[in-house]
Amino acid sequence: MPQWSFPTFIPYPPSKAGYWSPVTSTLNWCEEDYYATIYSAEIVNSLTNLLFMWLGLKGIRNYPMQLVDELSMIYTTCLMCYASFSYLRPLGFRIFLAIALTSLAVFITLYYHYLQDPVFHQNAYALLTTVVVLRSMYTMEVTLRPSWRHSTEEDRLAREKKGLPVPSKEHQHHENVRDLKTLKTMWFMVAYGLSMFLGGFLIWSLDNHFCSTIRGWRRAVGLPWGIFLEGHGWWHLMTGTGAYLYIIWGIWLRHCLNKRQEEYHLWWPHFWNFPEVVRISTDSGSRLAKKSI
């Protein structure tokens, strides 16, 4: 090993077992474990994240910093908005859209910090979410509805008369049946997701407006049953489920936009299951193996 002449004040301790042993994480960086204290596996890794710890502690006692927690909803929705509107668009449009959405996010952040009014944040988030969902609905219909994409038998015959290349009648029928089935399932997923999301929002609103009454009910029934009257908890569960369904819908729709419907399908055996988009691959040319995305 190289011999360096730096002054040594404290010998570098060896790695040792710590308070949180055994190690269960999938990653273990180069920094040795628990050499400084048994309560921190990677002390430098932890200390260099003090900014995020500071933001959390600051938010506990400082209302304006608490807004950062809520603004993450705006930033995530802006990313979803970019993904919805930028697909197959020219580079110039994508750059313009990225700048516009970034500017919008900055404006909402600064104006929200100035107003410190939660209603402004709620309205901005609702408007952005509505735009993203409506855009995705439009894209879904245009991509999959045979009449919208001019894939009916009449359209096929009209192109054939003009001498244009056309698919066979059987192939077009197969694609139309497949896509109409996909469209039906997607609309059910959209309705289910919106119902969960709006239902959670309704419960959260009732929880805010009738707080004193609901608190009285909780005290009357006691624990553990009073927990089921915690509206904010239902808001988290239901909007989380709605957001998950939107993400799965977006993934599946993107595969349809890429004309890869034959490679992927939606795994959703029962209403109470969480759906997944799965890849279909041929194993030894005989059976189908499903791999989660």
Image: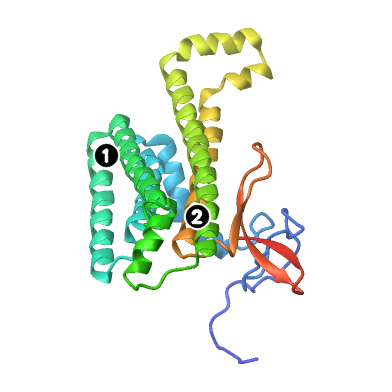
Q: Name the residue under label 1.
A: 112
Callout 2, which amino acid?
Asn
Number of marks in picture: 2
Q: What element carries label 1?
A: helix
Q: Where is residue 283 in the image (x, y as percent from the top left)?
A: 74, 71
Q: Could you tell me which secondary element the residue under label 2 belongs to?
A: helix
Tell me the quarter of the picture where residue 64 sits.
top left
Which residue, given by chain and number where applicable, does mark 2 sit on? Answer: 176
When the figure is inspected, residue 226 is found, relative to residue 30, above or below; the finding is above
Asked if marks 1 and 2 touch (Cβ < 8 Å), the reply is no
Is residue 114 visible in the rendered image? The answer is yes
Residue 245 visible at all: no
Q: In the picture, which quadrant includes the C terminus?
A: bottom right
Question: In percent of the image, x 34 and y 56: which residue is there?
Answer: 82
Indicate which label's residue lies in the foreground, 1 or 2: 2
Q: Which mark is residue 194?
A: none
The picture quadrant where one finds residue 39 is bottom right
Which numbered disc flags the more N-terminal residue, 1 or 2?
1
